[in-house]
Image (tube, rainbow, N blue to C red):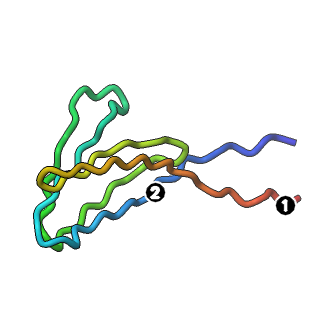
Amino acid sequence: MAMPSLQSFDILLVLTNDLNDCVSVQLLRDYHGRHTHPVILLKPAETLTLVLEAGSSYQYAIRRRNKVAGITYVAWFYMSPISH
């Protein structure tokens, strides 16, 4: 009996700026060989959707004025048991 292959699933992480000020979201680690750390500015009520690969971890900095919050997200997926 052949082993089932594992599939890669994408996970959507949705960030919404529910503050009255703009905030920035910055990727803190290199992923897939990229050497840039993009920064995205979110205005009040704007939403950013990030596509994360299951099984990977991601690190972001969220900045508002002089305050910074770090976010580490580990994207997991659930695979149902195999029935015979």
Classify residue 44 by image quadrant: bottom left
Depth order, front residue of 1/26? 26
Task: Give the residue furthest to the front.
Answer: 66
Give amino acid for label 2: Ile
Distance between the Cα atoms at labels 2 and 1?
A: 25 Å
Q: Eyeballing the image, is 9 above or below 43?
A: above
Could you tell me which residue is drawn at 80 percent across and 57 percent down?
82
Q: Earlier in the sequence, mark 2 or mark 1?
A: 2
Q: Quadrant of the N terminus?
A: top right
Q: Amino acid at mark 1?
A: Ser
Q: Is residue 25 above or below residue 35?
A: below
Mark 1: few/some/many CA within 10 Å (<14, 14-19, 20+): few
Q: Secondary structure at mark 2?
A: strand
Q: Position of residue 71 (x, y in %)?
A: 37, 49
> Residue 66: image x %, image y %?
14, 50
Say which of marks 2 and 1 sits in front.
Answer: 2
Residue 16 relative to residue 83: left or right: left
Residue at image location 16% in from the left, 56% down from the top: 64
Label tally: 2
Q: Which mark is residue 11?
A: 2
Give coordinates of residue 11: x percent, y percent: 46, 57
Residue in the image at 24% along x and 49% along y: 68
Dot 1 corresponds to which residue? 83
Compared across the picture, whether 36 is left or right of 71 comes to left
4 relative position to 7: left or right: right
Q: Residues within 10 Å of mark 2 (few under 14, many from 20)?
A: some
**Relative image position of residue 24 (x, y in whole percent):** 17, 52
Q: Which element type, helix, strand or loop, lies under badge 1?
A: loop
Which residue appears at 84% of the width and 61% of the height? 83
Q: Which mark is residue 45?
A: none
